[in-house]
Image (cartoon, grey):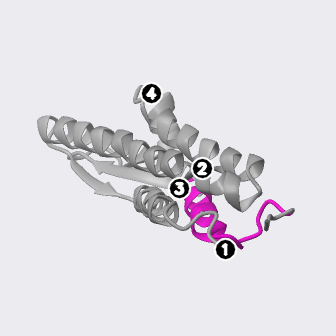
Amino acid sequence: MESVSFFVDPRLGRGTVLLGASLTVLGFFAPFVRATAGHRPQIEASALEVAIGGAVNLWLTLGVALAILWILWRRRSGTAMRAARAAIFGLAVGGALPLIYTSRRIDLVAVADRADVDWSWGLWLMLVGLFMAAVGARRIGAD
């Protein structure tokens, strides 16, 4: 039975999931949204700032990424990782839902305030990371 001893070891199908979860954590702290309204100055915020500012559901996305990393930390054998495939997939899909919901809410508020909203690279980094984790969950623990 094969196992890995080093946390960031990409063998046994861990690489894609590990990279995806790491990108999601990085994206949470990166610029998330930029808004401009009339003569007011441009506002830029990370998902962390948006979560602190009231969109508390965004904490779920960070929690999902950390939970996936924790699963990779605890499960080192191929058998243990295969047993976590469905959990990792479900977490990755569930982590995208707060991003979609909050993005829609921000768009609706921007329309009501006649503001322009531009989505920054942090949002796309988190979505790509969660997508990678979901796709990689299929191969995790594979020999």
Quadrant hosting residue 123: bottom left
Which residue position is annotated with label 2? 83
Is residue 17 found inside the magenta-colored segment of the image?
A: yes
Distance from Cα at disc 2 to Cα at disc 4 = 31 Å
Distance from Cα at disc 3 to Cα at disc 4 = 16 Å
Query: Quadrant where the N terminus lies?
Result: bottom right
Quadrant hosting residue 15: bottom right
Mark 1 vs mark 3, foreground winner is 1
Q: Earlier in the sequence, mark 1 or mark 3?
A: 3
Which residue position is annotated with label 4? 56
Question: Could you tell whether 22 is left or right of 55 in the image?
Answer: right
Distance from Cα at disc 2 to Cα at disc 3 = 28 Å
Q: Secondary structure at mark 4?
A: loop
Residue 18, above or below 103? below
Which residue position is annotated with label 3? 27
Residue 84, above or below 7? above
Q: Earlier in the sequence, mark 2 or mark 3?
A: 3
| Nearer to us in this view, 137 or 50 | 137
Dots 2 and 3: beta carbons under 8 Å? no
Query: Looking at numbered disc 3 in the image, what kind of residue is underneath it?
Result: Gly
Q: What x and y, as percent, mark residue 7?
A: 80, 59
Question: Could you tell whether 31 is left or right of 107 in the image?
Answer: right
Q: Residue at x 41, y 58 (%)?
A: 127
Q: Secondary structure at mark 1?
A: loop
Mark 2 vs mark 3, foreground winner is 2
